[in-house]
Structures are given as structure tokens and as C-alpha cells.
Image (cartoon, rainbow, N blue to C red):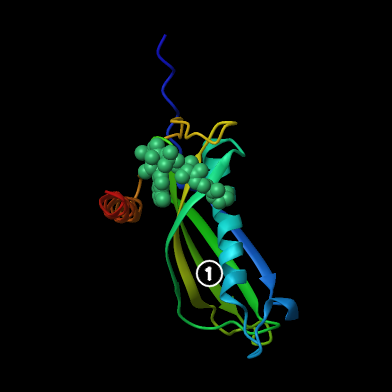
């Protein structure tokens, strides 16, 4: 008997945010946050999105395509991560993460984009093999379609590189 089709899900159902104040152990000798600390947070937050989207904790990080750092965040300032699904394949999910800095000592100070990243997670079984059971992503807005097409182009570039 064929498996029942998976219910398409909006990215809003798994959208995840994380905020923290930059602490001394996460800073370099310039007093700014380590890129590696931000990357670990990106991996965690994007992982939560992937788990929630497919309703399973069994996901692994397959790749981080691109991580661009634009502006530093200093000790005592806030990191604010926002992560959303942009594309789903059969077993994979692309998650886009934006990271903002904010200085809470300037209440009217605007947050700034410090970093963005494109990640891919894969749903796996107990033996670590991909499971083709990721719910399709609902595309509702123009932005949803644009992000989906961009993720598709990154996927095609990755596949071409693999060959
Ligand atoms: C990710 C992993 C499960 C993929 O296994 P695989 O045998 O290469 O799987 P396949 O070639 O059948 O690809 C399965 C899916 O993963 C995607 N994929 C595989 N490698 C990828 C990569 N490097 N980047 C992005 N997507 C990738 C494929 O496009 C495919 O997507 P689809 O099912 O939506 O079409 C495997 O490479 C792995 O276990 N990697 C280690 C993961 C890990 O330890 N991460 C860090 C700790 S969580």
C-alpha cells in the first residue's frame, strides 16, 4: 500500500529565534564574538527548525553552504538569530539563518545584520540513512517562492560540484 501523502507545511510552523547576550568566553582578544560561536548557534537553531518541520529529532547537518560575516558584535551586546525553512526535498531541508546584533544600552539603536547562513539538514533513520519523508514546504508569498528558487539553485550547484 502506498504511503499517505505528507501534509505540506508553512515555514511559519517551524520558524525559530534565539537571543543571547555575548559573554566573555565567547569573545576573541578584540572583545568581539568568535565566528565559530555564531556558527555553532546557527547549527543549533537551524537544526531545531529542521526537526520541527519534519516532526522528528533525527536530523543531521549535511552542509553549511555560505556564511558571510558583515559586522562584529561585541561582548555585552545581543545576538538575535532568526531561522526559517526555505526549501524541502525528499529527505533534505534548507534552512536560512539571519543573525542580528543589537546594543541594549542604546534602546533606540537599530539592530544590525551581522551574519547570514544557508544550511542543509537531512532526515535520517537509526542507521543514519536518509529518510524520504520530509513534508513539502507550502509556498505562499513572493518571498517564499524567491527563497525556494535560490535554495534550488544552490542545491543544483552543489550536485554539479559533487559530480
Ligand atoms: C547527510 C548524509 C546523511 C547524506 O547521506 P548520502 O548517502 O550522501 O545521501 P544521498 O546522496 O542519498 O542524499 C540524501 C539527501 O541529502 C542531500 N545531501 C547529501 N549531501 C548533501 C550535502 N553535502 N549538502 C546538502 N545536501 C546534501 C541530497 O541532496 C539528498 O536530498 P533529497 O533527498 O532531498 O533529494 C550523510 O552524508 C551524512 O551522514 N553526513 C554526516 C552528517 C553529520 O555527521 N553531520 C554533523 C553532525 S549532525
**Residue 163's spot in the image, x, y percent?**
26, 48
Residue 160 lies, with reference to residue 51, above or below; the image says below
- The residue depicted at 66 percent of the width and 89 percent of the height is 29
As rendered, which of 128 and 80 lies closer to the eye?
128
Residue 143 lies, with reference to residue 117, above or below; the image says above
- The residue depicted at 63 percent of the width and 85 percent of the height is 74
**Residue 134's spot in the image, x, y percent?**
46, 34
Q: Is residue 45 left or right of residue 141?
A: right
Residue 105 lies, with reference to residue 123, above or below; the image says below
Q: Is residue 20 left or right of residue 46?
A: right
Residue at far right of view: 24
**Residue 44's spot in the image, x, y percent?**
61, 56
Residue at far top of view: 1
User: Toward which corner of the image does residue 28 lie, by quadrant?
Assistant: bottom right
As rendered, which of 13 and 87 lies closer to the eye?
87
User: Toward which corner of the image does residue 52 lie, by quadrant?
Assistant: top right
Residue 155 shows up from this direction:
yes
Q: Residues within 10 Å of mark 1 (few under 14, many from 20)?
A: many
Q: Secondary structure at mark 1?
A: strand
Q: Is residue 125 left or right of residue 158?
A: right
- The residue depicted at 47 percent of the width and 31 percent of the height is 131
- The residue depicted at 60 percent of the width and 84 percent of the height is 108
Quadrant containing the N terminus is top left
**Residue 19's spot in the image, x, y percent?**
65, 66
Q: Which residue is mark 1?
A: 99
Amino acid at each position: 500500500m502506498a504511503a499517505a501523502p505528507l501534509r505540506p507545511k508553512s515555514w511559519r510552523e517551524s520558524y525559530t529565534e534565539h537571543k543571547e547576550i555575548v559573554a566573555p568566553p565567547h569573545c576573541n582578544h578584540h572583545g568581539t564574538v568568535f565566528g565559530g560561536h555564531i556558527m555553532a548557534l546557527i547549527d543549533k537553531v537551524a537544526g531545531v527548525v529542521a526537526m520541527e518541520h519534519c516532526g522528528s529529532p533525527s536530523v543531521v547537518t549535511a552542509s553549511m553552504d555560505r556564511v558571510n560575516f558583515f559586522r562584529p558584535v561585541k561582548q555585552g551586546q545581543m545576538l538575535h538569530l532568526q531561522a526559517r525553512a526555505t526549501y524541502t526535498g525528499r529527505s533534505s531541508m534548507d534552512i536560512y539563518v539571519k543573525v542580528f546584533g543589537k546594543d541594549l544600552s542604546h534602546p533606540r539603536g537599530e539592530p544590525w545584520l551581522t551574519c547570514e547562513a544557508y544550511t542543509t539538514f537531512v532526515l535520517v533513520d537509526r542507521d543514519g540513512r536518509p529518510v524520504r519523508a520530509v513534508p513539502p514546504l507550502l509556498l505562499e508569498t513572493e518571498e517564499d517562492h524567491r527563497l525556494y528558487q535560490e535554495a534550488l539553485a544552490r542545491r543544483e550547484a552543489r550536485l554539479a560540484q559533487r559530480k
